[in-house]
Image (cartoon, rainbow, N blue to C red):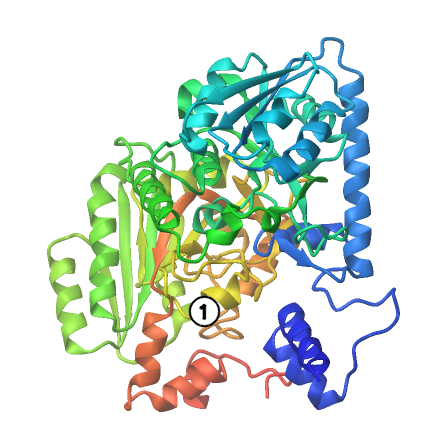
Amino acid sequence: MFKPFRKVFHILRQEGLKAFFKRIKNKIVPLKSPHLSNRPYTDFAGFHARSLISPEVHAPFQEADKRCFAFMENVARDLLAKAGRLENAPLFSVLMVACNCESMVGDAINSVLKQTYARLELIIVDDGSIDGTAGVLTACSDARVRVIHNETTLGKAASLNHALKAAKGKYIGYIDADTVWDERYLAAMVGAFSVLPDAQALYGGQLLYREQSEKPYAVRFGALNRALLQNRNYIGHSAFCYRNDILRHVGGYDERLKRFVGWEFILRVAEKCRMYSVPVLLTMYHGSAAENSLENNYASCADFQLVQQISRKRFEVVHAVRPASQYLKHPVSVIIPSYESLDCLKECLAALIGLKEALGLDIIVVDNASGSEVVEYLHELSQSGHIQVVFNDENMGFTFAVNQGIRLAGKGSDILLLNNDAVVTPAAIPRLADAAWQVPSCGIAAPQQLLPGGTPVLKTLIPYVNPEYPCDANINAVHRNVAHVPLYHNGEVLELRFVPFFCVYIRHDVLEQAGDMLDAEFGRHYRSDRIFCDVVRYIIGKKVCHVASAVVHHKFQQSTKALKKSTKAQGAYQTMFIKNQWEPELARRYKFRKAPWDD
């Protein structure tokens, strides 16, 4: 009797609620052909892009999945060939912490010793086991194995730090007792280091198994997305490796933690070092087979909150660096189309005014007929010389207001478009400017759009996210806006097809080629950002780039919420936001046409 419910649950998990109701409406049954798929991708490019926000694919695997996994086998094959051509094979140190895992540790050890890359050492720390684990370790006769016995249980972090002191290899990797490596794993990682000479750390994907099942229930691999990694871990510690020499920069493992030790260490490495994702599936994780598995303690773990706390503190320090005077190589005009939302507007402008002198910013606010409190506040700032303000008598919408601001900007100024509910971090504008002018063919640079934890749309935008914590939403499942992910991705700059204009940096020469304005005629309140991105990409031949090192906090559509709530503005809300059109009188005034396709 439960089979129908299992089937419904599977469809909901794989496709979402909207797709499920569409099935019911159209009487669509699950597809039987092995060549058909309901995945949101059909090839590796789509899979790779999707992995940035949804790094797990659950069984049963479909043809779209299998062709991607097969390509990843070809990536592994290529890396193995490159490793085989190395003249001087570097030593690879493999670390393991074993505690009361007698039944499984032998398989993990054997998978290391059977690696096709033979130049390795395996350092095992027996962390005070009271079962037969010590006997299994003592029975290892391979000369490449060294065993350290802790008299009492010190914990994973302290045990790893002991192992690190003994490690002699150029590269360091780790394997859990509940993980088995494909015999090609180390060779593939060494091959990847040879392909990526600037790489200081690498990680691959994992096949996930329940208990002793012989078939994986999921594949976990995500191209490097630094914001998602900070929100919730998706990198297996046993699929992660790094250069020994980075330890002097990042330190060892945090001994305050009992759980999430690997995640916290990986976060520090990602923040301070050059790290790449490598799309191979060469590790098999049997996490649920261990009683003390970290995966079994995720939901209520205080250590998860501690990792979030300490990583957020580091995050704030990194992005609070105030740039030196004259840092920007081009003048920048910040244009803020604004409507109501006084508290958000104050926070937005306070951050900008604090940077105005250091960066030489010109701040232009175009107000769309806000109430008296907002008007008085803006008038005071204008009188003090902090900002320029344009006051509209009626709400003209986002695009028209932006164009008014562009016309006021200085000749030759780059443009930063910014929502009034967005707050720039001190380092964001210089980093966007650097990317706009230094990344080849970049025309528009966009930051992380960091939405606060608890934002209702977070889970819809980013399927894997923990919605209680902040995350970047500029790359998301709704927009499907990733244009290209490099095969080996360092998580820094990503080419997009489109980015919402809550905050974008536009080079002045690109803006001039686009006609010095957004398309207000056919995109009064929205759509103009998509049109402009396509103009930049297809007509001008430049790229739209996501810059992970630039962070802007966004409270998400506060002006739209204010417009929707206003009883006086219901007509404007329906026309401007719902229909995205112009009232006939305004259309005639500005000679805007109504297209026949825009009913």
Instruction: State the SS at label 1.
Output: loop
Q: Position of residue 577 (x, y in %)?
A: 44, 80
Q: Amino acid at mark 1?
A: Val
- Placement of 593 over or under 495, stated as above or below: below
Left or right, 279 with reference to 70: left
Which quadrant of the view contains residue 81? top right
Residue situated in front as seen by the camera: 459 or 56: 56
Q: Residue at x 33, y 53 (%)?
A: 334
**Observer-nearest of 417 and 286:** 286
For residue 45, side relative to residue 419 (left or right): right
Determine if residue 412 is in view. Answer: no
Q: Residue at x 77, y 30 (%)?
A: 183
Q: Quadrant of the N terminus?
A: bottom right
Badge 1 density bin: few <14, some 14–19, many ≥20, Cα 10 Å: few
Residue 35 image offset from top left, x and y in percent: 87, 64
Residue 383 visible to the viewer: yes
